[in-house]
Amino acid sequence: MVSSSRVFRAVVLALRVALGAVFVYAAWTKLRQPWELFAMSIDAYKVLPYWAVVVVARTLPWAELAIGLVLMAGRWLRVSAGAASLLLLVFFVLMVRTYVKGMQIDCGCFGLGDTISPRTLARDGSLLAGYLFLTWTGFRDRRKAA
Amino acid sequence: MKLFVIALAALLPCLAASSDADPGKSLGSPSAPIRIEVFSDFECPACKGLHEQVLPLVMKDYVIPGKAYVVSREFPLRMHQYSREAANYATAAARLGKYQQVADALFLNQAAWEVNGKVWDTVANVLTPAEAKKVQLLAKDPSVLSEVQRDVDAGMAAGINQTPTMFVTRGASRFPVTGVVNYNLLRSMLDGLLK
């Protein structure tokens, strides 16, 4: 029993660090290039007005960086994993909508050259499952502590 | 037509185009600080959008003032039945200095020839009978066919997976830009690179 609990904790730790690193990497791919390139990716979804595209393009990469670092540090797990899940849920819904409509655009997830396809949907769907799992463990641990 | 006139004005400095760019398919000065390579497919609707809505503005604001050099590259997608044929004719026309006219005509009439397959009729409409004869011969010339294939190979090597894709280069920095981009964003990016 103790052994399986340790294994579970190790899995959660590995997942937390890996999924935190994914957010940091996603932020890095956007911050190392002109912000307009990410703005073009957002604009291609055709869901936001121009001013909102600019605001999101300039702020989202920093939010991703902060969430990723906090996740990797293991602080405020419920908040950081919850925020990551919410963000990815929004991205995933938009990607599915775009794919269903037959629009061939870059997903904008990790820089450019990542056209929305069954492969990118499977990848982001798996990541979303991972973040939701981490969020659940955060709430579960809090209940246990209480 | 408008693009053609602007293109003609910008074409003159291309006589000394860099060795890897077909001078007949390049616009502006090769010494311009920004280089924009456009990989497109004549049968792709988004490429038509870029050609007709965005590139004329790039020409006016950046190519003619000497800030950017635009190089057209062919990237006919396998899913499009006539795009390779169109690319061959356009590349052949470039040898006669008629690339822009042919490209304009192909994009303008895309909806018709992609259905009826009359690519040649579209191309011939903007050429004199003498030019048409030369272009028809050149379109089968191995050097023209290999030039189109070289563009495709270069695009594949650069990891292109959709058209249109532009590569914006400023010094050692090279950025891929895909789709029919919002010109305000493209302008902001180009201005940022020029600072």
Image (spheres, coloured by chain):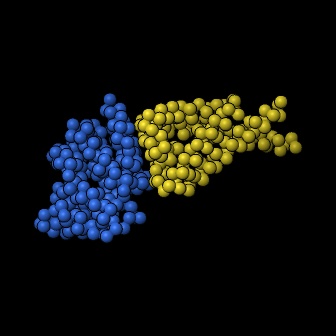
Above-or-below relation of B65 to B100: above
Judged left or right of residue B38, residue A78 is right
**Chain A, hue in figure:** yellow
* Position of residue B46 measured from the top left corner of the image (x, y, whole percent): 37, 53
* Position of residue B88 measured from the top left corner of the image (x, y, whole percent): 27, 64
Residue depicted at x 31% and y 70%: B116
Can you tell which quarter of the image residue B103 is in?
bottom left
Above-or-below relation of B95 to B166: below
Judged left or right of residue B53, residue A74 is right
Please state which of residues B2 and A123 is positioned toward the viewer in this rendering. B2
Residue B177 in view in this figure: yes
Please state which of residues A92 and A122 is positioned toward the viewer in this rendering. A92
Q: Please identify the quadrant where the C terminus of chain A is shown.
A: top right
Q: Please identify the quadrant where the N terminus of chain A is shown.
A: top right
Residue B149 in view in this figure: no
Chain displayed in blue: B
Residue depicted at x 44% and y 34%: A51
Residue depicted at x 19% and y 46%: B6
Can you tell which quarter of the image residue B128 is in?
bottom left
Can you tell which quarter of the image residue B99 is in?
bottom left
* Position of residue B138 measured from the top left corner of the image (x, y, whole percent): 20, 66
Residue depicted at x 55% and y 39%: A25
* Position of residue A102 measured from the top left corner of the image (x, y, whole percent): 48, 56
Judged left or right of residue A88, residue B122 is left
